[in-house]
Image: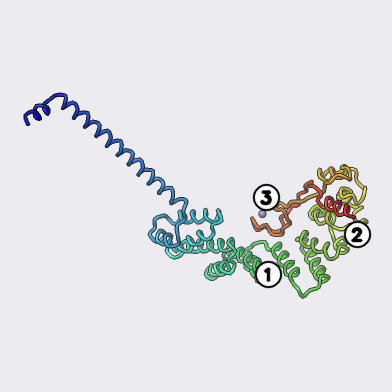
Amino acid sequence: MNLYFLEFRDPLFGIIIFFIIIFVITALSYWFNKLKKREDYKHLDNFLKQFHEVPSQNELEVLVSKGCLSEKSWLLLANSFTKSGNYEKSIEIYSQLLKVADKTNYRDTLFLLGKTFYMAGFLERAKQTFLEILKNNPRTPQALSYLLLVYEQMKNYTAALDVLEPLSELKKDISVEEAYLNALIILNDVKISSEDKAQKLLEIYKKTNQMTHMIFEYLFRVNPKIAWENLDISKSALIVDILWQCDKKDLNFDIIMQNSFLKELYSAKKYIKEANGSFVFELDLLINLNPNTKATLGFEYVCDNCNQTYPFAFHRCSNCHAIEKMRVELLIVKDYHRDFSEESNSFL
Ligand SMILES: [Zn+2]
């Protein structure tokens, strides 16, 4: 026992204890910091995770009703969902906002909901939403314009025409819309013969001088003779794609020889040799190209209103909804048809 107390009082023993205490404190501090860092990462991960996951409908209900965000923030969030194509989530947000939000913005939110229904393809629900707006506020041009688009998508062109009346009362120019819808009614009427359709479409064209591409696309398809007789050749560039694809047997060379653009177009097609060049680059290239070269004219279609480009002809731009704003752009492309013809002939 005495020996033990003697050793305990030894200065060396004190130094050893001192270093043990320092070691324990350092080890504890190291582990504590490591644990804290891990917790911090976990918290950060959880924090970031909530931005990748879309809240469920129930969560949204709670969040909107609690007023965690301002109404403007919810509208911005719904708009960003719409832009990214997540229509379902933006519809949920608008629907929740309509239940709890300030009644002063009720009509605007309802309009945004209807617009999202339309974009998502829920046409019946979009129709009901715009009709609800118009029931209380009949002089809302935005709702009328979208209701017209909905009826057009539903192929209810007569109902779409009815919407034009209140729009014209609001001093909106409806002449193009009217010509377009009337042309659609004729084109989709199964009871009218193709000859009668051609005559009725011509009446619209002569009366309004609009819907040139839409009407002449049909005329050149069913009755090229009438099409040539009624074509205003100063508008040839508007329907250059239709003229290019017209069969050689359907061409009216008396008319073609009167117009320099048409002479250049059909010289480029190698149907005639009446032009040595053209101010239009693509036509000039094809006119002076070796006839054996496998190149031809291609087309792309640009909306003059919003500059959206399409690979096919359109009458109403699906991006900005403008009518009669299509511009045909020429392209030089590989002639796949000639490739195919040559391959077919090689089997003969
Ligand atoms: Zn457009």
Residue 129, position as x, y percentages in the image: 54, 67
Residue 307's tag is 3
Residue 101, position as x, y percentages in the image: 43, 62
Which residue carries the number 2 mark? 249
Q: Which quarter holds ligand 1?
A: bottom right
Q: Earlier in the sequence, mark 1 or mark 2?
A: 1
From the viewer's perspective, tell me whether residue 118 is left or right of residue 227. Answer: left
**For the residues bearing labels 1 and 2, Cβ distance under 8 angstroms:** no
Residue for point 56% across, 68% down: 125
| Amino acid residing under circle 2 | Lys
Residue 56, position as x, y percentages in the image: 45, 60
- Which is nearer the eye, 261 or 224? 224
Residue 275, position as x, y percentages in the image: 90, 46
Establish if 239 lies above or below 332.
below
Distance (Cα) linking label 3 and label 1? 27 Å
Name the residue at the bottom extreme.
Answer: 191
Q: Earlier in the sequence, mark 3 or mark 2?
A: 2
Q: Residues within 10 Å of mark 3 (few under 14, many from 20)?
A: some
